Image (cartoon, coloured by chain):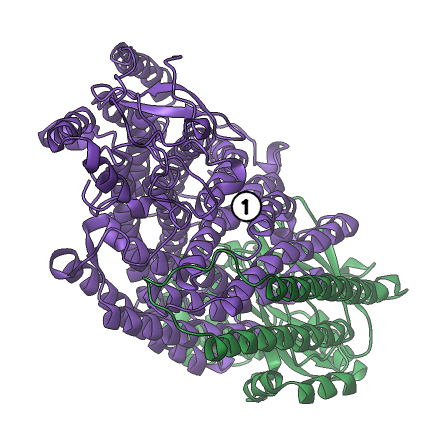
Amino acid sequence: MKNTDLSKKQSNTLTEARINEELRALESTWSDKPGIIGWLSTTDHKRVGFRMVFTAFCFFTFGGILAGLMRLQLSLPGNNFLGPDMYNQIFTTHGSTMMFLFAVPVMEGMGIYFVPLMIGTRTLAFPRLNILGYYTYLFGGLLLFFGLLLNIGPDAGWFAYVPLSGPEYGIGKRVDLWSQMVSLTEISALIASTNIIVTVMKLRAPGMSLNRIPLFVWSEVITAVMVIFAMPAVMIASSLLSMDRLTNVSTHFFNQAEGGDPIMWQHLFWFFGHPEVYIIFIPATGMVSMIITTFSRRKTFGYTALVLTMVATAFIGFGVWVHHMFVTPLPQLGQSIFTASSMLIVVPNGVQIFCWLATLWLGRWNLKTPLIFILGFFGVFVMGGLTGVMLASLPLDTQLHDTYFVVAHFHYVLIGGAVFPLFGAVYYWFPKFCGRLLNEAAGIAHCILFFIGFELVFFPMHILGLIGMPRRVYTYLPETGWGDLNMLASIGAAVMVVATLIFFINAVYSWFWGKVAAANPWGADTLEWSLPSPIPQYAFQYQPVVQGRHALWEQTADSPVVTGLHINNREVVSTSIHDAVPDHRYGVQGPSIMPFVVSVITGAMFIGFMFTPWSLPLGMIALFFGFLGWFWSNSVEHRPPYAPLEDNPVYDDPADYKPVEAAV
Amino acid sequence: MTRVSSQLKAASLLASACVFFFSCGHGNQSAVEPTGLQAEHLSFLWWIFLAITAAVYVVVMVILVAAFFRTQRAAAGDEADLSPDPSREKRASSVVKAAVAVTVLTMFALMLVSFRTGRALDTLSQAQTPLEIKVTGQQWWWQIEYKDPTPSNMVTTANEIHIPIGRPIKLELVSHDVIHSFWAPNFHGKKDLIPNYPTTLFFRADEPGVYWGQCAEFCGFEHAKMRFMVVAEPQEDFERWYAASQQPAPEPVTDSQKFGRDIFLKSVCTQCHTIQGTPANGRVGPNLTHVGGKPYIASGSLPNDRENLAKWITDPQAIKPGIRMPMNTYSPEELNALVDYIQSLK
């Protein structure tokens, strides 16, 4: 390890040869299998995480192209560019892509990549499960676009309200593609979430007690808990819908003529759908906290408050879903309660904003692209939050609901609240991906153009909603007077496209020819910056011991490290939940092709279920053998602890650190 | 617009910028140019929310800009401040706490205003003798039925609601296919029409005029072209219209009109459409008894003139792709006569 204080210090007393031997052993222990099999079977969270982020950005691009097509269609009244059939498929695919295939997976991908590094470990708790999650996500996404490209894309909206999406009105296999895509991507989300929760609870570096966990890691854990409560609701809903739609099964869960209930769909969908927004937003707040702390060169103001507000948001987020149903015939009193809860959620979000402003106000700014994106985040997201307050009001919502005002609102919240921080995070962490920095000047141009384009597209939509333009219309009459503002929005979309192109060009250019980055180019505080860029597969030569909330800022030259982990086994230290006291050595499995096989079977089973119920028992039998193969190769060889290095200089203060015993 | 709301407009620069946009003559399908009791309450609520949230936005942005100008700059290598000045931290902490308190109070106030408006919206539902109209949302048009104890006095029409000003209106909203949403923003907020969940909406028009509304819940192919017109008129005008609408269709006068009627009655048209006073009594499509007098066809998406009628009859799928009306093939003479007949149905 070239760049850390640790290795410098060790080199004083250890021979180079010994270190090199250890590193070589670690490298071969943690490396993937060679070739295409190695690519398919990797258990390296960094590769999987990056693949997830990359795939999500591909879907972001496709979703963005669809948005561009919609803006083209709507730029003129009575335009004939897209007919209603194509337009409906496109807006459904756009919404589904951005929610299911971009926003959630990209946040999961960033978590999969950075959470283990930030908590100072080498792997996720369940590395094979991790790659299974990626493939189910990929298959779900491909399924959706397969439908669109064959002109049989889903056309009932990303919310797929019954009866329109039911067997009677949803023709062909269109909605089935949507519901199976949902099931597959939610399996992926659940897998990522369990993995992140267990990893953070059990694999933190010694000394990283709960009150020292970096805020981004907190945000990923809290999000993961939300996923575990929210996603089952939509998976159940989409499964019930598939059964309603499948000939020979033809259940009547949502069929009002047979005692089913279309409003039940809305409850199930929005019980997932609203928390979904926070599932996207909370990781972004984690990114905002990281960037603001690093770039205002001071400790985070109100760390505890920031953690608690994320928890509060996650909790209240489950109690607001009915505000999506304010114009359905539900009892007035019940709806009023949801007005109150929807307004209540402003309070924790307000606390977050105030704490960030305080950190900025009290700090010294290193004004680089990541921070500039965060300034953009404030400008956009705060307005989205405030229009959210308007929508929380039941009476006011009856006017604004399902109009372009809402379209404006949630793009302010999602692009402002998630995409701006995400871009900031990409500029921030890009050196960790490839060892090079993104170009600053292009980054600033990207940010400013994206901001201007965004405001041009979405600010006029507030007004369009107030003057009567409903959502999801493929065209409008010239008499409505909506033409000018729509044209303005379409011009803005072109500006956003240019801004995004600048980003892509910058990313590709900098990946190969950008400025080479040091290990910690921003002077940041979290553990991933102690690693060389790009990061070796074993990540940490020695897992660190954390001595404060801002690990690297509080690290001293004689900070202890973890020893005793076997270098010929994939081992990490497992620590206690609260105080992160070393508990035992935890061995994880190496790469296996079986997760890929299982994901193919799972995909085939779900796709088959669009046509025949027999796919379920057959798929289950196949899955049995798939898992058999998986677990057959699951065992980890237990070896005695690796002999601690003689005269290891890092044991300066043994009281700080209890050596790890083999307790597996 | 109420006087109070004008004052609020003046209070906020942003608000007046918006007013500029709204006053550009989009008034007949607008939530902020109310012409009924409920919409007026809602519009008032909107301006209150706008003024307060705009003020909050401005404050946050001012703080951010001030922070930009007053903070020092630093480089990545500069040592991070891990033990900042405690007195500054304490002051900042007090400010944050105060801001949170203000947020809580503001939210509480907005919630109370909101609940108050909610109650005010309800007042009309106590009205003794509202005009009762049944509105059925269908893919993709609106059936309008004026209720009357005597069945022969009932009026059935499509996509066009005539109402007397000043009198409470009670809409019974029903759907038998998919979910639609009734929205005439100048009068009231929207209400979803969910199969099996009949619901009602009370409103009142205070100024005469022609207003527009349209379906606000995505309902399939032609969701965009599912518009309706609300004609608010003085009581006597309404009564005149109502009496005329109760009449059966006028008998054709010219030869061409007569020929057109024969074509109509002989073709598939009758399976879906009703023309009172003729054997045509289909219930699938809009009632055509007085279609000739309507300004628009195709659910408010096509001006009602000869050319459009002919296009609509021969190839409705070109105008509203996906609707249930099939293409019809007629010779030019037949089509001409059919259009003559339909235009005579005033």
**The numbered mark 1 sits on a residue in which chain?**
A
Q: Is residue A601 visible?
A: yes
Q: Which chain can be seen in green?
A: B
Residue at 36% across / 13% down in the picture?
Answer: A662
**Nearer to the camera, A75 or B294:** A75
Q: Amino acid at mark 1?
A: Pro
Q: Is B46 displayed left or right of A56 in the figure?
A: right
> In the figure, the purple chain has which letter?
A
Give the residue number, with chain letter if any, for mark 1: A275
Q: Quadrant of residue A631?
A: top left
- Would you identify the image quadrant in which residue A382 lies? bottom right
State which quarter of the image contains the C terminus of chain A: top left
Q: How many marks?
A: 1
Residue drawn at x 80%, y 81% as measured from the top left: B235
Residue B257 showing in the rendered view: no
Query: x, y percentage for residue B19?
Result: 60, 86
Towards the viewer: B188 or A642? A642
Residue A329: horizontal and vertical position, in percent? Answer: 70, 50
Q: Is residue A511 left or right of residue A233?
A: left
In front: A482, or A133?
A133
Query: Toward which corner of the image does residue A455 lie, by quadrant?
Result: bottom left
